Image (tube, rainbow, N blue to C red):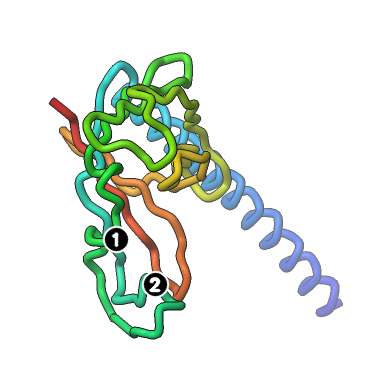
Amino acid sequence: MLLNRFSLLTLITGISLAGCEKEMSLELSQEYIKQANDLKEFVEGRSFSLVDFYSNIPIDYIENDGEVREETNLWTYVSPYLRDDQYILYSNNTLDVVQNNLKIPGNTEDVLPRTYAIGTDQEGVFMRFLDYQYNPLTYRLHEIGQDHFILAISWNQGATLYSRYEFAP
């Protein structure tokens, strides 16, 4: 009899917890959808520039150069052509990389057409944007401010790397 009461109590507790989990999951997914929509609205039709690149913990960014550095400010590793770029994002998920004066080696085009995507999954809001060679790379949304957004990506050594984009003139 005691075993049956225990089994019944375990079953009721399990059902209650599953219901709470589902409710929390729905709340989280609704919050993620809201954040993704906010990001879409924020970037569409606007021009941005990369203005900062950093880590949440000190890391040796270039691991194979024989020199060990422990840094959080990683701006010195950003290629000059990326510092010079402007990214114009459109509502149809296309974007233009305006190369300005400094061009990526091997491509002298003034404007490079690319695509981007913003969505959600069980981990939150993601943005499929560009890596340092303008190839697609998936980031996580870290922050949206009045004049900027910050994307994050997991990195080696347990670090998270952040790229900050601000409105470009």
What is the x, y in percent for residue 98?
30, 26
Q: Secondary structure at mark 1?
A: helix
Task: Determine which quarter of the picture holds residue 74.
Answer: bottom left
* Other-residue count near label 2 (Cα within 10 Å), few / some / many at <14 / 14–19 / ≥20: few
Q: Residue 77, labelled with which disc? A: 1
Q: Amino acid at mark 1?
A: Tyr
Q: Is residue 95 left or right of residue 77?
A: right
User: How far is mark 1 from mark 2, CA to CA?
Assistant: 9 Å
Q: Nearer the viewer, residue 153 or 136?
A: 136
Q: Between residue 149 and residue 20, name the one nearer to us.
A: 149
Looking at this view, is 162 or 80 the one in front?
Answer: 80
**In this rendering, position of residue 143 left or right of residue 158:** left
Mark 2 and mark 1 in contact (Cβ < 8 Å)? Answer: yes
* Quadrant of the snapshot with the N terminus: bottom right
Residue at numbered disc 2: 62
Please say whether residue 36 is visible from this viewpoint: yes
Which residue appears at 29% of the width and 25% of the height?
42
